[in-house]
Image (cartoon, rainbow, N blue to C red):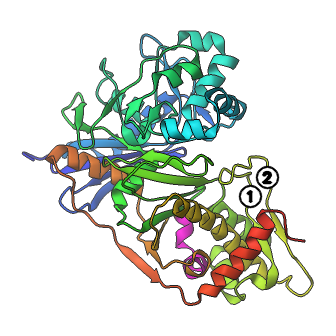
């Protein structure tokens, strides 16, 4: 890189906020960062994301930045008219109004197995295709004005380039639409038309490491990707390592050498941002479960951790089913959380804390099992996200998961992955950055996982008294 342009920038445009990292492409070291909040809600004017991005870029400064990449929340539907203006607020991944439309689309193609074989993923309310169906059905006047559909990261990348005629996406984000196939590596315009009722313009799928254009002031723009693919790009898990993200929601994913086609719908057969595949499961309930447990006990997080550590494995038979906000994996949108097995003998603060942590971890362990059922090798878990900072989670995870665990250093992994992609596009080769692994825990007693998870399974499946 010539002149003063020494760095690259990575953007995470998430549900809650825009985060920008300015990174040294030599080693992945973060030199500056900024954050701007997004409006609350499950539908948002996408121009609010642009304002947040512009504000964050203005704070960090880009005079010494040579390239930029954007990773964004997956699945969100950005519909544009013939002039490139939004025809309605974007529907986000967590907007569930299209759940009946997901059911209808599954039936119309001939069932869940047909969808898995066609695109790698069975539609649920988060998937873009279901939001297109909802719009065409519930808002026909709005649908009539739409000419183009994008994902959040596509739209921001397009705006960064000055809104040229050609829009781009990447295979990682496109694989979450329901109309791009990880099986064939191509769009399925027939499925888009089945969802929306007619054709829409879609972005070209760029290659990993491609420069898709430049900003008006000369920064190279990489293809960008979806948030989970961005995190995977930053972490680069080795074969057999599964990433477990314990944030507001949970995600369990890893790289794989072939597409997944899970007819049960549990495993989303996504692509990654490197040319491979990213089988993934998402849960609605993760770190917030820990927060609810601490609130019930009236303690701060550190005291909650101490209480959980003080109890015996299995919490003396007390089990939490952690579906506090319904659940996506398994698909139980109307489920509720509950403690089961409470008695005068086990009704202690310590057991309630322990059961809370174990219940949350058991929900994630179910996701790991689903990956294994798809033939994905799993030998180690890598924990990231706010919930991974809990000492109780780090201590209990190996025994519940039945896997050695490493807690990765706290980072904005999605933005870091976007920066890594920007460096790749700029230099023509993927950087060899590594991320720090702070804490390692091995399994000390394999029988604990069997006992805790068997009791949890009884509660989950309705067999517990």
* Residue ID for mark 1: 323
Please report the bounds of the magenta region as a residue range: 386-397
> What is the number of the mark on residue 90?
none
Element at label 2: loop
- The residue lying at 44 percent from left, 80 percent from top is 439
Examine the rendering and report whether any part of residue 18 can be seen. no
Q: Position of residue 183 (x, y in %)?
A: 42, 40
Q: Confirm or deny contact between disc 1 and disc 2 (CB under 8 A).
A: yes
x 39%, y 36%: residue: 184
* Residue 277 included in the magenta stretch of the image: no
Q: Secondary structure at mark 1?
A: loop
Percent position of residue 327, x then y: 70, 52
Q: Is residue 460 above or below residue 312?
A: above
Above or below, 158 against 291 in this view is above
Residue 396 lies within the magenta run:
yes
Q: Is residue 327 above or below residue 347?
A: above
Residue lying at 49% horizontally and 85% vertically, measured from the top left: 442
């Amino acid at each position: 890189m010539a002149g003063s342009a020494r760095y690259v920038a990575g953007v995470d445009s998430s549900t809650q906020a825009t985060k920008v990292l300015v990174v040294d492409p030599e080693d992945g070291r973060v030199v500056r960062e900024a954050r701007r909040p997004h409006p609350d809600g499950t539908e948002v004017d996408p121009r609010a994301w642009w304002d947040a991005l512009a504000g964050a870029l203005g704070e960090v400064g880009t005079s010494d930045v040579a390239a930029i990449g954007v990773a964004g929340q997956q699945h969100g539907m950005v519909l544009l008219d013939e002039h490139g203006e939004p025809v309605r607020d974007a529907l986000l991944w967590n907007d569930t109004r299209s759940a009946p439309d997901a059911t209808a689309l599954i039936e119309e193609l001939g069932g869940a197995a047909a969808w898995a074989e066609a695109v790698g993923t069975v539609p649920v309310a988060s998937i873009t295709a279901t939001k297109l169906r909802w719009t065409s059905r519930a808002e026909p006047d709005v649908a009539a004005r739409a000419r183009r559909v994008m994902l959040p990261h596509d739209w921001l990348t397009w705006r960064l380039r000055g809104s040229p005629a050609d829009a781009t996406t990447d295979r990682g984000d496109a694989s979450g639409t329901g109309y791009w196939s990880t099986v064939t590596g191509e769009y399925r315009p027939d499925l888009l038309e089945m969802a929306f009722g007619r054709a829409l313009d879609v972005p070209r799928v760029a290659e990993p490491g491609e420069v898709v254009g430049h900003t008006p002031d000369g920064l190279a723009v990489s293809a960008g990707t979806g948030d989970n693919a961005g995190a995977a790009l930053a972490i680069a898990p080795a074969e057999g390592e599964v990433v477990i993200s314990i944030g507001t929601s949970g995600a369990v994913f890893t790289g794989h050498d072939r597409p997944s086609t899970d007819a049960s719908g549990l495993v989303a057969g996504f692509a990654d941002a490197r040319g491979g595949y990213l089988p993934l499961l998402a849960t609605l309930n993760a770190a917030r479960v820990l927060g609810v447990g601490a609130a019930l006990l009236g303690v701060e997080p550190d005291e909650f951790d101490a209480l959980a550590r003080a109890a015996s494995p299995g919490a003396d038979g007390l089990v939490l089913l952690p579906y506090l906000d319904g659940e996506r994996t398994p698909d139980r949108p109307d489920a509720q959380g509950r403690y089961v097995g409470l008695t005068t003998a086990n009704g202690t603060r310590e057991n309630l804390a322990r059961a809370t942590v174990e219940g949350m971890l058991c929900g994630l362990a179910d996701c790991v099992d689903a990956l294994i059922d798809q033939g994905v090798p799993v030998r180690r878990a890598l924990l990231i996200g706010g919930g991974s900072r809990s000492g109780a989670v780090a201590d209990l995870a190996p025994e519940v998961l039945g896997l050695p665990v490493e807690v990765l250093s706290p980072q904005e992994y999605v933005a870091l992955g976007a920066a890594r992609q920007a460096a790749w596009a700029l230099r023509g080769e993927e950087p060899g950055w590594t991320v720090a692994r702070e804490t390692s825990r091995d399994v000390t007693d394999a029988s604990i996982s069997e006992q805790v998870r068997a009791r949890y399974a009884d509660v989950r499946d309705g067999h517990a008294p």
